Amino acid sequence: MITMDMNVNIVEKIDALYDIGRDFMERGWIHGSVVENEFNDCSFDKWRKSVNDMLYQIGGCEDPNYQRFSKNVRKANLKHLDEGLRILAAVRDEIACSSVRSGDQGAKGRASCGRLSPTYY
């Protein structure tokens, strides 16, 4: 059984991994133009493995987010990193919304639970 506290911990982990990915992305772009297409392979692989492991923990190997991340985020470049960040943001929103809905706030529908962190805008 996943409790609201467990969801908060997962959201914090997703936020941390998202921030690491954003740091990679920001290093690759300066003033709107691509500076480097490739990142440090080792750092990217560690990040990718951490995200992959977390997505597996959340939904298992049949989870569409896990499968999409595993299939589409393979190379240490901006395109793959951007796809990974979008998947992380979607998973984070899904978990945050389920936490709000299951809490005592009395949220009704998706309109009551938008993005809770400014890093996703």
Image (cartoon, rainbow, N blue to C red):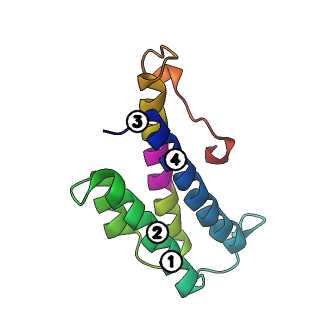
- Figure check: 28 above or below 41: above
Query: Mark 3 vs mark 4: which is more N-terminal?
Result: 3
Query: Mark 4 vs mark 1: which is more N-terminal?
Result: 4
Q: In front: mark 4 or mark 1?
A: 4
Label 3: which residue?
Answer: 3
Where disc 4 sits, the SS reads helix
Label 2: which residue?
Answer: 50
> Which region is colored magenta?
86-92
Write the residue at 39% across / 66% down.
52
Residue 19 covered by magenta stretch: no
Q: Residue 59 at x, y = what percent?
A: 30, 51
Q: Residues under labels 3 and 4: Cα distance?
A: 10 Å
Q: In front: mark 1 or mark 3?
A: 3
Q: Can residue 76 be seen in this view?
A: no
Location of residue 49 by image quarter: bottom left
Tag 2: amino acid: Ser
Tag 1: amino acid: Lys
Q: Residues under labels 3 and 2: Cα distance?
A: 22 Å
Q: Residues under labels 4 and 1: Cα distance?
A: 20 Å
Task: Determine contact: label 1, label 2, CB under 8 Å.
Answer: yes
Label 1: which residue?
Answer: 46
The rendered magenta stretch, by its main secondary structure, is classed as helix
Of the pair 37 and 93, the residue shown nearer to us: 93
Tag 4: amino acid: Asn
Residue 9 bears which disc, if any?
A: 4
